[in-house]
Image (cartoon, rainbow, N blue to C red):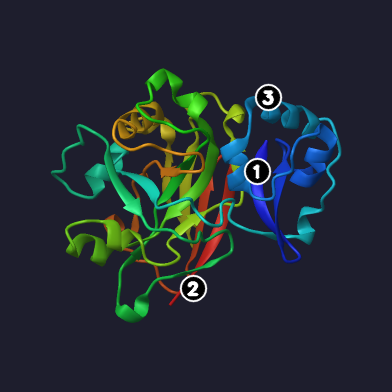
């Protein structure tokens, strides 16, 4: 099943879709049918949901007709307002490490950075290249992990239980700022540069650890194409490691790293008018248009 946030009139609503995304249910309808408290906010649902509630919703939406025409509402990023800065894993694909430096050594431990994201960009949104400042704008397609439970000192074997689901995302970056400053926070955190899809796929849809293709095209040209089975540090390792010192909370998001093929390595910076398509197979494909 898939979860999203939509704008219906002037109100934000939580919507759930079946596995084939052809039946759509408002959380209000599901709460009435299954007799649980309605949730007006997806983050609230992620924080307070119970496993048996997920099971009930899953059974209901696969055997009933939806009550919403998805074309009548405005689709938003699944989580329009992140809980706090997005956690990111750097250097998590071998080929990407190599393309960013001919003599680069593979990291011995996960590399983390934070991405400021008060507001998420979503599908069809315009993304600034900040080209009036003569910047080198770049793309990084990634799988996003959305936490479902509080996690502190998590054991690897417990990590699947702590996850809510997965989304497609793009870690847009201003490379010259990133490289000049000696740290990545500023170059990764320009306004609008955290993009995520409209849908979070519940973890029950995938075997664990998840293995999905992560792709990015620019103006129809395939730039990135890899699979999450190629992670240097898999999701159980990352979450177990980071929670030794940082407590993760329901709704926290982790960008798990990007494959090779970024614009900096190819010397192809994003320009106004470019169409960037982010795809994570089995979850979502979405497009953004670059502007000045």
Q: Which residue is mark 1?
A: 3
Q: Is residue 13 left or right of residue 79?
A: right
Determine the residue positioned at 49% across, 53% down. 82
Q: Are marks 1 and 3 in contact (CB under 8 Å)?
A: no
Q: Are marks 1 and 2 in contact (CB under 8 Å)?
A: no
Residue at the extreme left: 103
Label 1 – label 3 distance at C-alpha: 16 Å
User: Which image quarter: residue 45?
Assistant: top right
Mark found first going from the N terminus, 1 or 3: 1
Badge 3: residue crowd in 10 Å (few <14, some 14–19, many ≥20): few
User: Which image quarter: residue 54?
Assistant: top right
Determine the residue positioned at 40% across, 59% down. 172
Which quadrant of the rendered structure holds the N terminus? top right
Q: Which residue is mark 3?
A: 52
Which quadrant of the rendered structure holds the C terminus? bottom left
Badge 2: residue crowd in 10 Å (few <14, some 14–19, many ≥20): some
Q: Nearer the viewer, mark 2 or mark 3?
A: 3
Count the marks: 3
- Residue 94 in percent (x, y) is at 28, 37
Q: Is residue 179 above or below residue 234?
A: below
Q: Nearer the viewer, mark 1 or mark 2?
A: 1
Q: Is residue 265 above or below residue 143?
A: below
- Label 1, secondary structure: give it: strand
Badge 1: residue crowd in 10 Å (few <14, some 14–19, many ≥20): many
Q: Nearest the camera: 6 or 208? A: 6
Q: Which residue is mark 2?
A: 273
Q: Nearer the viewer, mark 1 or mark 3?
A: 3
């Amino acid at each position: 099943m898939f979860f999203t946030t939509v704008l219906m009139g002037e109100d934000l609503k939580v919507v759930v879709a079946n596995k084939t995304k052809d039946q759509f249910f408002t959380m209000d309808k599901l709460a009435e049918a299954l007799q649980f408290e309605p949730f007006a906010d997806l983050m609230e649902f992620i924080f307070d949901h119970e496993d048996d509630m997920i099971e009930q919703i899953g059974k209901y939406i696969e055997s009933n007709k939806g009550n919403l025409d998805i074309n009548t509402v405005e689709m938003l990023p699944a989580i329009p307002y992140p809980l706090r800065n997005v956690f990111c894993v750097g250097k998590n694909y071998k080929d990407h490490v190599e393309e960013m430096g001919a003599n680069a050594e593979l990291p011995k431990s996960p590399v983390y950075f934070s991405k400021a994201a008060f507001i998420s960009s979503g599908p069809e949104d315009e993304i600034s290249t900040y080209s009036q400042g003569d910047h080198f704008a770049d793309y990084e397609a990634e799988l996003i992990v959305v936490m479902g439970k509080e996690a502190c000192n998590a054991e690897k074997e417990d990590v699947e239980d702590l996850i809510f689901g997965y989304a497609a995302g793009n870690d847009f970056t201003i490379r010259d700022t990133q490289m000049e400053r000696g740290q990545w926070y500023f170059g990764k955190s320009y306004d609008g540069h955290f993009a995520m899809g409209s849908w979070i796929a519940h973890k029950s849809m995938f075997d664990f650890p998840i293995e999905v293709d992560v792709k990015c095209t620019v103006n129809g040209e395939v730039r990135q194409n890899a699979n999450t089975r190629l992670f240097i540090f898999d999701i159980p390792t990352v979450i177990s490691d980071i929670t030794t010192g940082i407590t993760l909370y329901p709704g926290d998001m982790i960008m798990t790293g990007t494959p090779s093929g970024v614009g900096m390595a190819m010397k192809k910076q994003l320009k106004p008018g470019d169409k960037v398509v982010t795809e994570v197979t089995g979850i979502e494909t979405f497009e953004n248009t670059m502007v000045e």
